[in-house]
Image: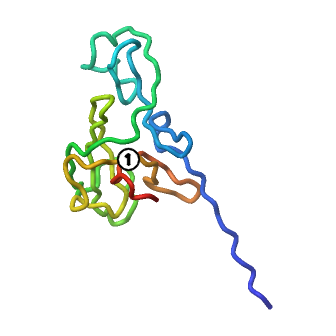
Amino acid sequence: MAAVPSRLVTKTRVPAVQGLFTEVEGVAHLIGARVPDRESYFFPAHLPGMAGGDPAAVGAELEEVLLSPTGTVWSYTTSSYAPPPPFVAATEPYEPITIAAVKLEREQMVVLGQCPQGITPDDLEIGMEMELVIDVLHEDEKHEYTVWKWRPAGEGN
């Protein structure tokens, strides 16, 4: 008697936090905001309501914009310890992750993000081109929770 193939369980991919990133025609983008008629960009988009930023943003009607999907390494480090909740580690026990600070040229801002598993500080250097990707942060029985991550440009999937 032939074995019956096990049923594949497909997990639904959902953002770990809604409204921070999107994918348009296969290209990942952070969702930011801009003061109309100015080159003042914010990420996350609600940042102008917090301390600091462009004074012209106070009370302004901001427009939602997709931020540049590429930038250059401004700095990088390794997180050798698991951050506190609500962070959920992808592995148990926790495996260190590489974090890159990437400068977006058009926006003139630096955005932090994890690098995909397997990318270490030895793979990065200041000024190298990076690209934004959507990747799994952690998963449970039904879902893969996604976030933005930075990887060296041209590395593919």
**From the viewer's perspective, is residue 44 above or below residue 113?**
above
Q: How is the image coloured?
A: rainbow
Query: Residue at the spot x=27%, y=50% of the render?
Result: 99
In the figure, is residue 96 to the left or right of 66?
left
10 Å crowding of disc 1: few (<14), some (14-19), many (20+) = many
Query: Residue at the spot x=71%, y=78% of the render?
Result: 5
Q: Nearer the viewer, residue 39 or 134?
A: 39
Residue 110 on image: x %, y %? 27, 35
Query: Residue at the spot x=38%, y=15% of the render?
Result: 35
Q: Nearer the viewer, residue 136 or 82?
A: 136
In terms of secondary structure, where does tag 1 sit?
A: strand
Query: Residue at the spot x=30%, y=34% of the render?
Result: 105
Residue 37 on image: x %, y %? 39, 12
| Amino acid of disc 1 | Glu
Q: Which residue is mark 1?
A: 131
Residue 40 placement: quadrant = top left
**From the viewer's perspective, is residue 31 above or below residue 34?**
below
Residue 126 on image: x %, y %? 19, 48
Q: How many marks?
A: 1
Residue 146 on image: x %, y %? 47, 49
- Which quadrant holds the N terminus? bottom right
Residue at the extreme bottom: 1
In the figure, is residue 80 to the left or right of 147?
left
Q: Nearer the viewer, residue 112 or 15?
A: 112
**From the viewer's perspective, is residue 47 above or below residue 126?**
above
